[in-house]
Structures are given as C-alpha cells and as structure tokens.
Amino acid sequence: MSHAHTPGNGGADHPAAPMVEEITDFEVLEIAVRELAIEHGLFTAEDHRRFTEWAESIGPAAGSRLVAKAWTDPAFKARLLEDAVKACKEIGIDWAEPTGFGTPSDYMNLRVLEDTPTLHHVIVCTLCSCYPRPLLGMSPEWYRTTNYRRRLVRWPRQVLAEFGLILPPEVEVRVEDSNQKCRFMVLPVRPEGTENWTEEQLAEIVTRDCMIGVALPRPGRTADVHPMHKARRPVKGQAHSGEAAHESKK
Ligand SMILES: [Fe+2]
C-alpha cells in the first residue's frame, strides 16, 4: 500500500493511528456492568481485582491431573464420566467455590467427553467463550475468536488440520458447543508408549490443547505450539462475504 504525501500540509491528511487497540463493545459493556455492580454493592473493586488475579493465575494443570488420574484409575474414570463436578473434588477442584475465597461459580455442569480410537471430540463456544476455567484456566486467545467459533462447527477437520491435527476419515469428529449451562472438557485417548508412566509423567503430556481437542497427547509433546498451517484443502465457494473478508486479512 502506498501513501501519497502532500508536502506542506503537515500530514493533515494522515490521521494519527490509535496508540492502543480500539475498545470493543463487549469491553464497554463489561466495564459498565462491573461499575454498576460495585456501585450497588454486589462486590467491591478489591473483590474484583482478587478474582481477576486468581483467574489469570490458574493454568490447565488441574485438567492435566484429572486426565492422568482417569488414565491410570478406571474406577475414577467411571466416576468422572458419571459426574465430573463431583469427581473434580477428588483432585481438589470445587466447582461450587473454585477460588477458595468465597466467590461462587455460576455454572455447575461439567461434562467430560471421552475420546476413543474412532471418536474425537473438540470443544467450542459458538456464542461467546464458555470454557471450563476452574480446570483449564483462562481460554487461549484463539478460542475466543469469531474465526475459530464459526469455522470449527462448519469445517472441523479443516480447522483441526490448521492446528496440525489431521485425523483419518474413519475417526468421527464430534464438535461440542459449550454454553452458559454446560461446560465440556475432552478426555483424550492415552497414547501408546506411556504404559509404565506415573500420573505425574502422564500429566506432563496432557496439554491445554489436548483437553480442548485441537491436539493429541503423545510422548515428548509437553507444550502447545501453534505453527501456522495453510489449509490443505481450502473450502471454496462456501464462504460468505464476511468470512472471505476476514480470511483476506490474514
Ligand atoms: Fe460462551
């Protein structure tokens, strides 16, 4: 892109770029609701600060422990699939009061989705960004993008391939859409080559992405890295104009 500079007008035809990202409508709404809540005494600014620091400090370690325990203890796995909220208490996660300092949770329905060699789950929240935070911490930025949310439900295999996860056609892919009433977490298949591993060793390879369903655990893979993969078989002719505009910005 080239800019024609007109000498002598001090660059008045070039409005200064904003120094920070524009604030979104959602952020404006959040600030307004928060300030109202503080004003009406629902919670204090200090409560809010404390909660935000807690929310940003928790990572996916609890989820990793949960999966490792389910892999090594069939009775625990059965309890986890039956009532995940109850089973979480066994590893010290209380969904009713996850912070430990009196901030109750607004949702109490966690479902753990068990993968099999022929069934793969992946989670999304198409409406916003619902996510099992007490177990996995804050959601990754890409999970909250409209790009991920709208494309995963339409072209799950293509989106997974962009994460580097290419599933054979015989594996059924099931996308679960989280919402305010129900949160999901994926229980991946325990990989080969981990037969004599301890729970601690197993937990190391159960990364956040494995529990969202955009990666598979394997020995030696202990971190989520996202190389940019071009779609191998890009869908042509189905994208609506908004989609095409969004894609072209990449
Ligand atoms: Fe949501």
Image (spheres, rainbow, N blue to C red):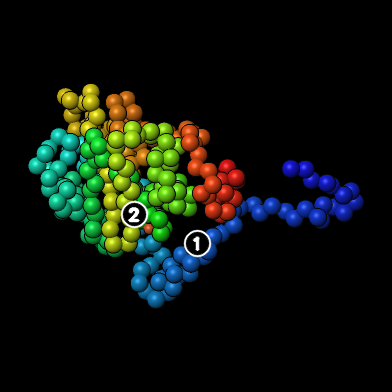
Relative to residue 107, is residue 151 depicted above or below?
above
Callout 1, which amino acid?
Glu
Secondary structure beneath label 2: strand
Query: Closest to the observer: 24 or 183?
Result: 183
Residue 178 % position (x, y): 33, 55
Residue located 72% across and 53% down the image: 16
Residue bearing the label numbered 2:
177
Residue located 31% across and 46% down the image: 174
* Quadrant field for ligand 1: bottom left
Residue bearing the label numbered 1:
27
Q: Is residue 168 left or right of residue 20?
A: left
Q: Quadrant of the N terminus?
A: top right
Task: Bin the neighbour count of mark 2 within 10 Å (Cα to Cα): few under 14, some 14-19, many 20 and up.
Answer: some
Rounded to the nearest angstrom, the CA distance separating label 2 from label 1 is: 23 Å
Residue located 33% across and 35% down the image: 169
Q: Is residue 52 visible?
A: no
Residue 115 % position (x, y): 24, 40
